[in-house]
Image: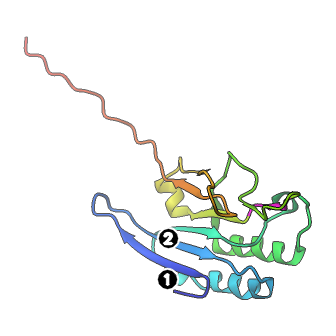
Amino acid sequence: IKPHTLTTAFNCNASNLDFTITNTYGPSDHSGSLPFLQNLRDLPPLIHGSWILLGDFNLVRCAADKNNGQINATLTAAFNDTIQDLNITEVDLFDRLYTWSNKQPFPILARLDRAFTNNSLNLAFPLSSLSTLPRPTSDHTPLLLSLSTSLPKAGFFHFENY
């Protein structure tokens, strides 16, 4: 447990895959964003094997992540630098542009919720995807991360005795 994150390691008995999930809720007060990003940079020594980093980062990666285009360029650059330093890849979200709304008559919309994976997890689950679920009450849209791989299926072998 670190400020704004909870990291849990899992061991799968059905396979040889051990993986770690870090769930995050970034500070909404941006005066805490840089220390938050530093805490993320401190996580890799605790991670062994496949890793998923996901949650509400309360940060955007580019101007297109907000419907009004108003961003803090310093925090955007720091967020992108952190992602690069952690050597993680964002799982693409294809069914929605924004994951948060202030729910006003003329709303501000932003993409604050994301999922990232490291190379080990990408190799184990190359067909992973991220999608949204219905948003009944929250100002955030819930995300569903599906880990998937395409393993070839063994053909049927038939032995016929003649």
Q: Is residue 10 left or right of residue 134?
A: left
Residue at image x 64%, y 86%?
39
The nearer-to-camera label among 1 and 2 is 2
User: Which residue is situated farthest in the top direction here?
Assistant: 162
Q: Neighbour class for label 2 at 10 Å: few (<14), some, many (≥20)? A: some
Q: Neighbour class for label 1 at 10 Å: few (<14), some, many (≥20)? A: few
Kindly identify which residue carries mark 2.
Answer: 21
Q: Amino acid at mark 1?
A: Leu
Q: CA distance from mark 1 to mark 2?
A: 11 Å
Residue at image x 42%, y 75%?
9
- Give the x, y percent position of residue 160: 12, 16
Quadrant hosting residue 144: bottom right
Q: Main secondary structure of the magenta part?
A: loop
- Mark 2 falls on what kind of element? strand
| Circles 1, 2 touching at the beta carbon (< 8 Å) | no
What stretch of residues is rendered in magenta? 107-111
Q: Give the total number of marks visible in the rendering.
A: 2
- Give the x, y percent position of residue 12: 33, 64
Q: Quadrant of the C terminus?
A: top left
Residue at image x 82%, y 72%?
76
- Look at the image and say whether residue 65 sits in the magenta stretch: no
- Give the x, y percent position of residue 115: 61, 62
- Mark 1 falls on what kind of element? helix
